[in-house]
Amino acid sequence: MNKKSLALALTCVLVCVVGRKPTGAEEPRDVSLVQLIANPDSFDGRPIRVVGYLTIEFENTELYLHREDAEQALYKNGVWADLGRAETKKYSTMNKKYVVVEGVFDSKQLGHMGSTSGTIAKIHRLEVWPTNLSDRRPTP
């Protein structure tokens, strides 16, 4: 292999390696709560984007499948939303609304007293899910 070919090959390798996104910058995967609950290990440690009914209450900050699940305390039909204490007040206007959440799923953390089906941690996006059908696009 001559010097030009070697230089070209090394350049290609560097472009491929440097041009890749770091693991932490992986795009969130659109999933449903049903998928998270049924196959938690498939999403463990992965960035996800999901829509659900949010409750922000003492010992019950959770994203549920449906409003009725929250009203009936069907904890296993939801996942813990790890907002952190400081963020809880910031997001209080989203309590009891359908929201889109982006964060990292943790299948091992089961919320308050192990009552939920996992946790969404490292939340970096939390927005009210639009009621207008034409505005419903989960990607930013």
Image (tube, rainbow, N blue to C red):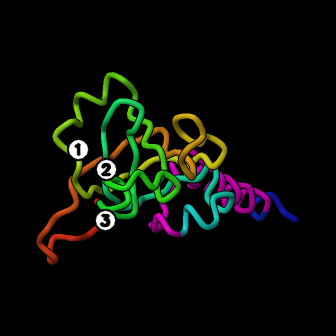
Dot 1 or dot 3: first in sequence order is 1
| Direction from residue 108 to residue 74 in the image, left or right | left
The kind of secondary structure element at disc 1 is: loop
- What number is the disc on residue 95? 1
In the rendered image, the quadrant that contains the N terminus is bottom right
- Residue identifier under label 3: 138
- Foreground pick, 49 / 93: 93
Residue 7 x %, y % = 73, 56
Dot 3 or dot 2: first in sequence order is 2
- Vertical order, 134 against 83 (above or below): below
- What number is the disc on residue 120? none
- How busy is the neighbourhood of tag 2: few (under 14 within 10 Å), some, or many (20 plus)? many
Dots 3 and 2: beta carbons under 8 Å? no
Q: Which residues are magenta?
A: 6-34
Residue at 21% x, 54% y is 128
- Look at discs 1 and 3 and give the one toward the viewer: 1
Q: CA distance from mark 1 to mark 3?
A: 19 Å
Dot 1 or dot 2: first in sequence order is 2
- Look at discs 3 and 2 and give the one toward the viewer: 2
- Residue identifier under label 2: 54
Which residue is outermost to the bottom? 134
Residue at 11% x, 72% y is 132
Three-letter residue code for mark 1: Asn
Three-letter residue code for mark 3: Pro
**In magenta segment, residue 19:** yes
